[in-house]
Image (cartoon, coloured by chain):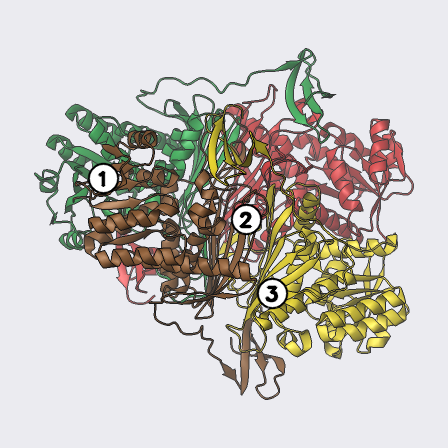
Chain colours: A green, B red, C yellow, D brown
């Protein structure tokens, strides 16, 4: 029942979520050493999460003799250097999202871990929320037929840390911060073997005095004909809005991960304290979540990662997935700039997916467009004459 | 307290909704004569709604000496002829949505009523739902600041009548049937004086064996920078999904008009009967609405129309609005065909709307990107150095 | 298409709701004269609702030669005098809830209108909400089987007018104000012919410095075995909570009439204005309703009343219903005082209702307690041996 | 980082949930041996959860040399014997709910573990749901003021195992099965030091052909004046309804743990499979939960139990709590039989709780009943004259 001993790189909000998850409940894996560029942040962090050792030496943290897994929770522009060092150290590496600032950068990281032969997991937590896992399993079991459309929305009033706002360090704005989640959620529902062909994206900077986009909407067309749609914003008011909708030929799924999960509180003020990540108010009607690290997917994500290491298999979310996400984001930015659809430039490994198939039914030589059961139990057919193209209603006895 | 005496043209589902509304509650307006192309449908309809007279003669119905208002509830391809006759008869005309199959057709109808000087109302019921009316009033009162984005979604498993499926008669598919609602809802939220500049639309025919689109998603860019987004489908499973979302610089609005309105019923079967328009099942969990004609806006719509006639003013929804909607739909179809953004070709009467304005605040010579109140009551600022473009955090005492 | 001409007695919040309903939309009935004890309130009210005439003379208002219907919107302690005068005037009378302060008072009012032979309607609006009307119709059609339990909850932070707080004028506290609604809602679901046998009620005064209860919970046992449960409070925080739940042997109904109806708004402040009756805040997350007079039942209530007058039939809610409600409230107060179940003292006209019937099914000589379909499609039975009383599981092939 | 080695007693649904939790995610505790009365069930169970050893010898399982903790997941009538054996073995014991069939039985179990000095935890999972834990913490921090009322509801269509239906083995019907959860949830919100004084309970057997209650509603009056209300049913239709509502003098909490948690799925059939515990259908609108063992509290419950053992402290839920719950259930059954309030007979250790306190505010010598801010910003007071007891409104300038 041995667990893993971890080097944690970074001490920001995401490293807090990670450590909270790893050291929460009855977990057997432990953070052994934490690295920060700042000695004081490293000290605070190690005290907060009872971590035996801290350092400001990146290489020393990665090469620490007692750790076998390195978690990269650093700002985007530091991923490549860190991952190169981990690969050289021959350890398993788990990297936060997005993998890179661009697909080119992501591809280099993918190649470096593949060449080194180390385990590499992509820490895309929102693909591991308990609702998402169950929903994806239902979709794969055929519960909603062929997926035709997925909407993934992630919006909030803007990030908490300064570096997030600097596109030079991150690679962009709300798309890089939030769109990466949405794209991979969409891929899980339409199928990871379903190639993203092209992207149409509209971006704008409406509220914040920054150079990068604080709002974006995009459409992704997949090989099967399915459409992925993502909406991201750093100007949303009311908390953090995390919702996914999936339409299929035989069903529908709606998920709300954060603001409406069956927990509602009105308070006239007083007491209170922390409600939830990115909550905007501490009085009036509030919508907390139960266990954030569980609801946001961190628990199931790390379970999958460590089990995958133990079992010698790939995790659900790999560096290749991170690279695909970057490629779609690149296309989104190109589309916004060119004011038109942009194709996804990608070294595709996923095979091919057939077109969503509608089988045509006929009745009495006519094409059946729709069947409706009338209140009296009779069946009404809407029919199309294949020769003339004319449509007609017909009520038939059987139901 | 005199009411109006009405000629009803058409006997389909929409004419049923209209007559149900007009003859419901304690209304003072009455349908005096109904026209249908089919004598038997006219007879059934007049019995169903206690209408004194019925006819298959269109001109006779319109020119009936006892009526002063004509309601056009006919299929799209018959609107222009009917409206021409009403204009000639010098009566008030109320026409169902969409006004035309194309903007050109809509414009001719607009011109014929303007030349004749008759009252002309556009029966866009979903802009009159009680929730929409109150929400639009809140937005105009500034409750959510400047509107940045509106999503309007209308999806169901497909229309009940054969002619709806024939693009030659209607002008298209799901966009013409459902998108017209969404576009006008969006216009009410972004402001009717906010010019729609261009449209990006993706359409596909995924499930039904028809020539026109059974699914579409579109973005509309308005002069202010606001984005309207509509999603329409004839392949949605689970009932009729009517939702609107509005984002503003200072607030958010979510409306669900149909499937989740605070009325939930589980039934093991038995009893039951009619649940709601386009409901798919009659057992299990069902989501009826209370009073459909009220919740779908028919009641407030006709009140506005008849009051406008009585008061000699324009109604909220005019033939000009119908024409704008057709112009946006034309652009949507052009966009889908050209695979790119298409500009909205339009004889614009709405004036001009300024860009959504973000006022820049400074602190100590730095640009304030975001303000957050920390749990301990202190204020945290995210700042940008205007010279270097670098970002930093600063915690200040005051909150 | 003639409407009714109305004398309105009272100018408080309820008279505003009534006049708003009557003069709203395209109604054909009009308030002709309004009475108030205060000349200035009468003047304000008649201006607000465009009423031609006002008076402080109760008898003159009631006997006004141009009105045929009198609406009693006065405080509870003034109902009996007003209704006596209307009965003498031979006009139709519609009285707000509760009918009386006690069953004895209500019975005298019932008798005076019956002796006079005038139409008498009980203005219990919450039994006429569109959701309630449709839900009651579904229950009567058998959609949920036999009703076993009804919960009706009405709570808010307390009334707006001073007289409501004075038990001498009203007859009690939150039960008299709010419980009357709940009891009649419950009766509509369990069936009006289902005699209320006894009541258990707990009351307390927890927050407000008053003599009467500001909180109460009660159980009502009906002849069929069904249980009605009401919860009323003048200390609820968060707005006005109006919810009903109905359990049946074959189904369930949940209704939320006010705080969660598919309309959600977040506002950072500014703009705003009136949100909804008894809303507590004007910033943060707000939950307006669309059209309050419709959602709260006023529209359908007056339609039923005036149609009933026109058609010479009884309305859905009669003075006899008001009397039954008062009898149940009397029992509730007796129960609270005696600290035990109290029987409902009542001149019962409703006939008798059989016990909720569970038919016993047997399998192989055993009593079937429950049937479950297993994931593999087989049927599992839980059986009881009638001789020994022992329980066992048995899986059988057929499903 | 050593975990615990566990003896699991029982192989039913609850033992499955327990083992699923213990062996799920990255837990460090493991079931070492499982006991069942049936060798085949023991074999299936140990295979399902990868348990090294199984036995049908109760004493051998408990005294297994390699385990330090015994989890009692047996039917109610077997708890006392098992706990006696664990106490004798000197091991930590964790017992499923309810602790006993009666308070007398529970008290004997409490005494036996206290005499033996062993750790004893009460496995009341629903007090550990993530939402409950966060809500209770908010209440303790003062977010809703003094708690005045708690409603806890647990209803479903009836248990899956035969023995649950036999009151001789369980101690009763739906109260024993479900009410035990509700009572302890209520105690967590009103405060565990708040003595339950008396209970009013109504029970009935409406649908199932059994001797015990399949429906019950009860009120519990606590020393502070707070009221606990529980509703339990084995005849609910639509799934498993787990909801809690808490009212306080300054706020409100609503929790929905199961049927409405932000996860909604419509399926026309096909695919599907397991939806959730006690779901009734596999087509139409379904409401799955994400991770059942987390949402139902099992994860946090076992974390608290094992941490408490490791830290030498009491867990949140103790055998004493289990005994209090049994005492309240005893009173509920006595109340139902005696048709009146029944006092809770209890060896109370919890100290005393003051009455919910409303501080009286005065204005100009009058008692302030209510403050309302008017739309124009002025303040309206409802006042009571302490001498006459008369009420009046007064509008004052300040707000």
The disc numbered 1 marks a residue on which chain?
D
Q: Which residue is mark 1?
A: D60
Horizontal arrangement in the rendering, residue D221 relative to residue B113 (left or right): left
Q: Position of residue B4 (x, y in %)?
A: 84, 48
Element at badge 1? helix
Element at badge 2? loop
Task: In this rendered view, identify the residue nearer to me: D54 or C9.
Answer: D54
Q: Which residue is mark 3?
A: C341
Q: Residues within 10 Å of mark 1 (few under 14, many from 20)?
A: few
Q: Residues within 10 Å of mark 2 (few under 14, many from 20)?
A: some
On screen, residue D26 above or below D313: above
Horizontal arrangement in the rendering, residue C183 relative to residue D363 (left or right): right
> To which quarter of the image does residue A155 belong?
top left
Task: In this rendered view, identify the residue nearer to me: C94 or B230.
Answer: C94
On screen, residue B133 above or below A121: below
The CA span between labels 2 and 1 is: 82 Å
Q: Position of residue D390 (x, y in %)?
A: 63, 83
Identify the mark at residue C130; answer none if there is no mark: none
Determine if residue B381 is in view.
no
Query: Which circle, 1 or 3, is nearer the viewer?
Result: 1
Q: Which residue is mark 2?
A: B353
Determine if residue B398 is in view.
yes
Q: Residues within 10 Å of mark 3 (few under 14, many from 20)?
A: many
The disc numbered 3 marks a residue on which chain?
C
Name the residue at 32% across, 28% down: A324
Name the residue at 39% across, 41% down: D292
Element at badge 3? loop
Q: Quadrant of the C terminus of chain B?
A: bottom left
């Amino acid at each position: 029942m041995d667990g893993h001993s971890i080097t944690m790189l970074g001490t920001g909000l995401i490293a807090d979520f990670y450590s909270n998850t790893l050291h929460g409940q009855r977990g057997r894996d432990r953070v052994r050493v934490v690295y920060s560029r700042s000695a004081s942040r490293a000290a605070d962090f190690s005290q907060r999460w009872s971590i035996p050792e801290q350092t400001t030496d990146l290489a020393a943290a990665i090469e620490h003799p007692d750790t076998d897994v390195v978690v990269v929770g650093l700002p985007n522009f530091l991923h490549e250097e860190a991952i190169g060092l981990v690969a050289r150290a021959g350890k398993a590496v788990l990297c936060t999202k997005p993998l890179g600032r661009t697909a080119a950068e992501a591809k280099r990281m993918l190649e470096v871990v593949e060449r080194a032969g180390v385990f590499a997991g992509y820490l895309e937590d929102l693909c591991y929320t308990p609702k998402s896992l169950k929903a994806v399993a239902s979709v794969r079991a055929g519960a909603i037929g062929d997926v035709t459309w997925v909407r993934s929305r992630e919006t909030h009033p803007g990030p908490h840390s300064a570096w997030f706002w600097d596109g030079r360090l991150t690679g962009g704005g709300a798309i890089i911060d939030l769109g990466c989640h949405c794209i991979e959620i969409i891929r899980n529902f339409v199928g990871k073997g379903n190639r993203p062909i092209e992207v149409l994206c509209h971006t704008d900077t409406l509220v914040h005095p920054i150079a990068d986009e604080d709002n974006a909407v995009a459409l992704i067309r997949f090989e099967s004909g399915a459409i992925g749609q993502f909406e991201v914003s750093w100007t949303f008011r009311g908390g953090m809005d995390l919702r996914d909708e999936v339409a299929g030929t035989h069903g529908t799924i709606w998920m709300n991960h954060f603001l409406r999960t069956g927990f509602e509180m009105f308070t006239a003020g007083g007491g209170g304290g922390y409600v939830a990540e990115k909550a905007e108010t501490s009085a009036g009607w509030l919508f907390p979540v139960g266990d954030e690290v569980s609801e946001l997917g961190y628990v199931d994500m790390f379970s999958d990662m460590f089990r995958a290491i133990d079992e010698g298999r790939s995790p659900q979310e790999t560096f290749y997935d991170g690279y695909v996400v970057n490629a779609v984001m690149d296309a989104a930015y190109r589309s916004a700039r060119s004011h038109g659809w942009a194709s996804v430039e990608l070294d595709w490994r996923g095979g091919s997916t057939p077109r969503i198939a509608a089988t045509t039914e006929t009745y009495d030589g006519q094409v059946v467009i729709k069947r409706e059961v009338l209140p009296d139990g009779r069946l009404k057919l809407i029919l199309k004459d294949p020769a003339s193209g004319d449509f007609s209603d017909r009520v038939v006895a059987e139901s």
